[in-house]
């Protein structure tokens, strides 16, 4: 059965960490995703940032059926359709355009648009999205920006990505409007190229533990997704 937006969001809300992969080699990608999943990070984003990204996406989905695989850096209708055809569970974009939002409306693929300021967020809400990716979160002000946006947009939930680290993620996850954080810090291109699965596993385990310590039951207000 195809995942729904609701089921994808429920999983992300539970896992709270979305590793982001920029990888062009199928075997390396499968090894990396397997390592992350072994440590409890069972949802990942594979970005459309490499020439072979679509094949990587397709093969990782086949090899790792228990992992929720999202397609990231989806900028165009063509990429959205390719992600759906490859079997992605969901897609994300660093931004939002009317053209892409229309394509999403015609597609059944669960989608999380990117925003970087209030106007983007209002555009996303006009298209019916209330869960968005805030990118690049660290550069834009991190938790201070999230707190500021939570004032006028109390019902929006954020997936924060861009410059997140193991040091900053607990502060982000402690905010009531943050659904999850994403990033590449536990699976950098260098670590993947070096096939350093033990280090990737250790960083993933550290992230999973930190996420558990920032669990929603410690939050003052429940997440609504
Ligand atoms: C993204 O696509 O969200 C970012 O490239 C991830 O950012 P990071 O590499 O700084 O974690």
Image: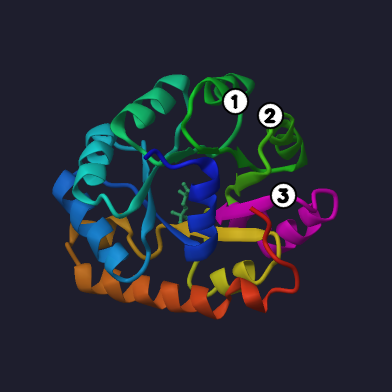
**Would you say the beta carbon of the disc 3 residue lies within 8 angstroms of ligand 1?**
no
| Disc assigned to residue 101 | 1
Q: How is the image coloured?
A: rainbow
* Secondary-structure class at tag 3: loop
Residue 82 drawn at (x, y percent): 35, 26
Return the residue at label 3: 156
Pointer 1 with pointer 2, Cβ within 8 A: yes
Which span of residues is magenta-colored?
Answer: 137-161
Q: CA distance from mark 1 to mark 3?
A: 17 Å
Q: CA distance from mark 2 to mark 3?
A: 13 Å
Q: Which corner quadrant of the image does residue 220 belong to? A: bottom right
Return the residue at label 2: 127
Pointer 2 with pointer 3, Cβ within 8 A: no
| Disc assigned to residue 167 | none
Which residue is at a point 20% across and 67% down the rendered structure image? 196
Residue 184 drawn at (x, y percent): 40, 58
């Amino acid at each position: 059965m195809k995942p729904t937006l609701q089921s994808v969001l429920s999983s992300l809300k539970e896992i709270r960490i979305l590793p982001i992969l920029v990888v062009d080699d199928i075997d390396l990608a499968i090894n990396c995703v397997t390592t992350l999943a072994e440590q409890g990070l069972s949802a990942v984003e594979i970005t459309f940032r490499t020439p072979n990204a679509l094949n990587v996406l397709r093969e990782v989905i086949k090899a790792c059926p228990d992992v929720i695989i999202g397609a990231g850096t989806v900028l165009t209708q063509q990429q959205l359709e390719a992600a759906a055809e490859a079997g992605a569970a969901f897609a994300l974009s660093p931004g939002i355009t009317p053209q892409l939002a229309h394509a999403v409306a015609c597609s059944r693929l669960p989608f999380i648009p990117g925003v970087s300021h209030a106007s983007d967020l209002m555009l996303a809400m006009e298209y019916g999205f209330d869960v968005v990716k805030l990118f690049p979160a660290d550069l834009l002000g991190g938790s201070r920006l999230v707190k500021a946006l939570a004032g006028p947009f109390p019902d929006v939930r954020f997936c924060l990505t861009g410059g997140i680290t193991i040091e900053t993620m607990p502060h982000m996850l402690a905010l009531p409007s943050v659904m999850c954080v994403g990033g590449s810090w536990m699976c950098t291109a260098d670590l993947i190229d070096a096939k350093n699965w033990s280090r990737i596993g250790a960083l993933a385990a550290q992230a999973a533990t930190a996420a558990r310590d920032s669990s929603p039951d410690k939050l003052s207000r429940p997440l609504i997704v």
